[in-house]
Image (spheres, rainbow, N blue to C red):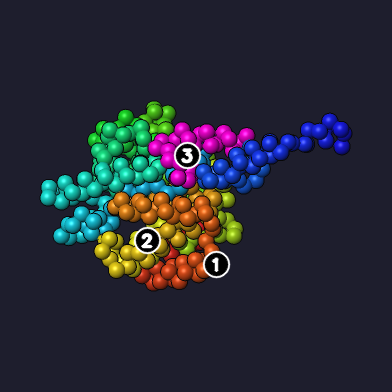
Amino acid sequence: MTKSVKQSKKISRREFVRDSATLAAAVATGLSLAGAYSVEAAEKDQAAVRKTRSYHPDMEYRRLGKTGLWVSAVCMGGHWKRIDKIIGASAELNPYVAPTDPSVLNPFENNRKEVVAYCLSKGINLIDLAGDSEAEVYSKAVRERREEVYLAYSHPSSELREPPNRNAKKLLELFDAGLKRCRLDYVDIWRLMALERGGQHTQAETEAMLTALETARRQGKCRFTGLSTHDRKWAKMLIETYPDIVQVLVFPYTADSKELPQESVFEAIRKYEVGTLGIKPFASNAIFKGDGSAASPHAEEDNRMARLTLRYILSNPAMTAPIPGLISTKQVDNVVQAIKERKAMDLTPQERAELKRATDQMWANLTPDYQWLKQWQYV
């Protein structure tokens, strides 16, 4: 080693402290330090994080893959299961369709606007829209604050799950109609909804989906593109074959999901820098004992289990963010608490054992229409 090289290796104590502080700040911000993560890269990422929408210093942010968007480590899912327990409705509400009765609609819309505003105030900056009423409900809730939030858009009845829509022309027409209906000039992500078993689509239907996504992005109607499916092998094939189009993938990921040792979709996700949003983190509430109301005798225990679940999911750096359906400001506070706990420490052996007992019961609690979720224990 030459003298000049030796000298270049030396750093002052001040530089060491500065660089250590920079990397520590990156960890506190939630940035991954996997691999050779330089001080310069950490500084650049921190600067980008501070410019993200609705930035809050207490929130953790993760890069949504190749989109370059920095989104909160827990985002907001559009479903509103159990919201009747919060707004005092006399009957259970459809979790995907907004109520039409004015006596229920008004408190429902007020709740959605209040919870969205509270999310933004806490640094939660992405809403995933996946039901037939969600796009309209949330676009109305954020109308005056559109540039403070990222919207991931989908509208099931206008997309591939309906056979008449399985051509590019029809998909684009319906997407345009949805934007106009929601009074949106654009969405940040069009994550088109395919069949749960996406491999059942013909090659022509798959190409129609990809053409529609690419065309909409080229036209400036969406900034980034992706899809949601429950078919791991099909998703992996699409990522590997069309990496410029499949920029975001939405798929189930629970408190007991694990990466397959071989042929995992995460191999392609990491290789092609795909942003990932995890649906059904609480297995359609099967992990909880209570009914979601603040007065439930199980409320405290359920809140703790929600935090353990989120911390577990975020221990996988390939997961950008889980997306629970938040129905109250107290649930938002619980999410923020989960982030704080995650920053402080990983799950302890005792917490992992507690979570394992809960997930064993979770699988036993699944209703018949959610038995398919067991297929996502290994991803």
For the residue pair 255 and 222, the one nearer the viewer reads as 255
Comes first in the chain, label 1 or label 2: 2
Label 2: how many Cα within 10 Å (few below 14, some 14–19, many 20+): many
Q: Is residue 41 magenta?
A: yes
Q: Specify start and end residues of the magenta stretch as a single range.
A: 40-62
Amino acid type at mark 1: Pro
Q: Quadrant of the N terminus?
A: top right
Comes first in the chain, label 2 or label 3: 3
**Image depth: mark 1 or mark 3 in front:** 1
Report which residue position mark 3 lands on: 70
Mark seen at residue 303: 2
For marks 2 and 3, give the CA distance: 26 Å
Asked if the residue under mark 2 is in contact with the one under mark 1, i.e. CB atoms within 8 Å, the reply is no
Mark seen at residue 349: 1
Mark seen at residue 320: none
Q: Is 8 displayed left or right of 333 in the figure?
A: right
Which residue occupies 31% across, 50% down? 329
Amino acid type at mark 2: Asn
